[in-house]
Image (tube, rainbow, N blue to C red):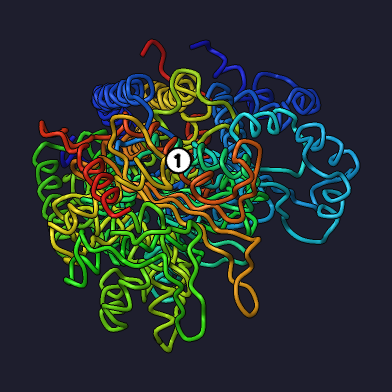
Amino acid sequence: MSSVGFDIDFDADDFENDGFDKETAAKYKPSFLSEWWQSIDKVTLGLFFALLAIGVIISMATSPVAAARIDKDEPFFFLMRHLIFVFMGLGGALFLSCLSPQNARRIGILALIGSIIALILVSTHGFTVKGATRWLRVGPIGLQPSEFIKPAFIVFAAWMFTATRRDPRVAGKLIVFIVYGLIIFLLIRQPDMGQSFLLTVCFAAVFFFAGLPLGWMLFFFAFTSIGGLGAYLTVPHFKDRIQRFSSSDSGDTYQTDRSLEAISNGGLLGQGPGEGVFLHRVPDVNTDFVFAAVVEEFGFLISAVIVLTLGAFIYRAFRQALRLNDAFCQLAVAGLAMMIGVQMLINLAVNLNMAPPKGMTLPFISNGGSSMLALCFTVGLILAFTRRRPGAYVYGV
Amino acid sequence: MNGAPLTSHHKIEDSDHKMIAEGRIRIWIGLAVFSFALLLIVLRLAEVALLTKPPRPGGGDDAVFELRADIQDRNGRLLATTINNYALYARPNKILNKREAVAGLVALFPDLNPDDILRRISVRRDEVRLMRGLIPQQRRRLLDSGLPGVFTKKEPMRSYPNGAVASHVLGFVDVDLKPQSGVEYSFNDDITAKDAPPKTVSLDLRVQKALEDELAQAVSRFNADAGAGIVLNIKTGEVLGMASAPEYDPNIRATILPHKEKNRAVNATYDLGSVFKPLTVAMALDRGVTTLDEAFPVHKAFTVQRKIINDDHYSPVPLDAAHILSESSNRGTALMALRGGADMQQDFFKSLGFFEKTPIELRGQERPQYHKDWQDISVVTTSYGHGISVTPLHLASAIGGILNGGVYIAPTLSKADSAHRPIMRRVISEQTSRDMADLMRFVVTDGTGRNAEVPGLGVMGKTGTADKPAVGGYDTRRLVTSFVGAFPQWDPNYVVMITLDEPKAVEGTKGFATAGWNAAPTAGRVIARIAPMIDLPEKPVRAAEQTPRQMAAQQEALR
């Protein structure tokens, strides 16, 4: 780590005290853009751009297949949609990256409140796709509040845990648990087991990173186990999926079977773009099972590179979290990185038949408006929390 | 830090610092867990992508239409199968330069008509089909050409790898694989059942090919309009071969024309003529109307209901049963039939299935035609095969019943097995059946069937030359000639039936166009070719060949 951090955070007052006149100070005060450019973590930003570009290229390959499936005349219908969301998300992420950590945190809390309200509205005003009521119509697009609630809740939990650490009078843990319980209740009602699971894992990670005692961890583990068992016994769709997965010979394993066929047909170098055969039979080829299509057409090498690019993005966020000096930023960045990482692992595991189908997208690559916007929101928060400023980083870690 | 009041900025810094230091260790652990999980995923990806054999493309979900099982002959040789190929489509609104597209397509597929293609891609439709039946290599070339606005759809196609061979029996399917005729139609349920095994039919591809070959040569050599041929296993009712000329290739739709598609073995009826005589003789012998020794006064003029009955081969002496057959005497069988009466004859014909369609599993069979009012003249003419029209298969099955020990067995295209029991009914006694075998052997050794003889096989048979029915009677210049042969005499097992429609007198037939000169030698050639291919009953030690000579001696005594 270089010591650039100190060089960039100019303040007009500093110059005045050091005997410069205001005019000179104003002359040397860096522009907003250059200040942003100097403070932003360019590795994270570069990887973010790379992932979005990869996603667009993959969408070019999968969009015609998905369009043909629903008899769309326009083969690049899904690519166009994807591009719109990429640009919207990119704008949002860049806007968030300009904020100070405090303001970014405030946006995160607002997003939490907003998405909880939206989640409640979904149960009354939402619309249903493939048996699950998860979407809320906002203008021409359908938004999925459960996608936005994950990063928002992580920021909130990180804030609460740090606040409790600083001032034990704040009943942070209790508040977090109540909010967590409320969200899980709303998610299970939809029903959305995949997001509930992911949120729980992320919460546990933040919990763990926050250094909470082992007793709490055990309590949390028991709580989720009972919750999971309860869901298994009461939600038929959930039970069905688990049973299908655990008994490979019986039942309908259509989705993962098609996915494995496509992946196995990929080989080392793939069939080439547009040459895939099995991806035409893969369900949700542009969303949940996009990875199977990627492997069939682009092969093991390129898909491994994509996986490692995603891994590098997450690794970079973790590295930044390790170096940060602010407890809240550290916790939030680690939690958000963990969220993207777990989502990616689950999606890949489902594609490779290592986990039951969950309805989880491959971050940055899959089509899906809410998912893309929520991920860009997450990246924006990470960029804001990891901005360089005096004393933000420690060296040698 | 627990419970410590927050008094100074430094304490917050300290507690933060402690928290951060502890958090770092835990984040490291989290990162390690994540990295480990990621490693597992990449390893699993390598396993599936690199080490798992991809499934064979095609089949399964690709089926657009219901799939059809293969059809194979009795020895498992392929007769019909379903293959995947491609149909060529165009999206007219995606083709910017129509002339260029037409030029590109015609360069790839010279069979296409440029004007027709231009017309078709000029219509305002989402997609139009231009061509069917592209093989994968052709599709490859199309895709490589990069022509815009054209694409292919996979579709199954029925293929008959032997071309025209057995086409009349197999039938064919339309472009949507819907069966139109033959085995494809009759056994459609078996063929389209889920995971159906190949459908085995009774045909023997080798026998079938030999039969078609000889029939086609005969039709061509004798300049006949058409012909039919049957090889029947008379112990089981299985049809080993069934041919009709002219023939068509079910793979080439343009050859499927009505006169070619007609299966003359079952879909056409003829007045078959003298090949009926063995039936009349068998009935008379079996029902006790006559004996082998009785001689009939065929040399005397004979009139029934003011109609004169003549013999083609006039005999100056009375003839016994053996010579009535070998000389093909109309008067002889007429006298036998009249003595038995109309009821006996009708009952006998009914038992041989002559009043209804044959039970074979083929559609479009022609119903036999016969006199509604069965007077004496009907008794007389039907005794030698006139005034009753049946299909060649009717006659072949009936002769089979006469020779196989006296049991009529329904002809079938199903391979005989324990599950498949044919319809059987006794029509004559075993003794009569043995006598008939001797009498029909005599026809070949000493009678009109000499040209059908194949040394060593004990060929039996009967010729039949019939005038074609015409308005108000018969047209004596237009003939239908038949030979119904059977072998071997010591244990009759197979019937070979040949029918030629309007054969002509040609070089080498001494000006005759009768059955003995065309149908009989054709049947003989078929027998000579197929006998080595099929199982023959073992020849008994006793010399059965002597019987015809005894008959000849017996007849000599009458002269």
Q: Amino acid at mark 1?
A: Leu
Pinpoint residue A298: horizontal percent, then vertical percent.
52, 25
Q: For the point 17% across and 53% down, which residue is it?
A: A228
Splitting the image into 4 quarters, where does residue B193 fall? bottom left
Q: Is residue A344 visible?
A: no
Q: In the displayed structure, would residue A194 be above or below residue A301?
A: below
Pinpoint residue A174: horizontal percent, then vertical percent.
21, 55
Q: For the point 45% across and 39% down, which residue is it?
A: B451
Splitting the image into 4 quarters, where does residue B31 fall? top left
Give B481 or A254, whichever is nearer the viewer. Answer: B481
- Dot 1, how many residues are within 10 Å of its Cα: few (below 14), some (14-19), or many (20+)? many
Of the 4 image quadrants, the one containing the C terminus of chain A is: top left
Q: For the point 43% across and 28% down, which residue is it?
A: A265
Q: For numbered disc 1, what is the local secondary structure?
A: helix
Pinpoint residue B95: horizontal percent, then vertical percent.
82, 46
Give the chain of mark 1. B
Give B105 or B437, whichever is nearer the viewer. Answer: B437
Residue under circle 1? B211
Q: Is residue A317 visible?
A: yes
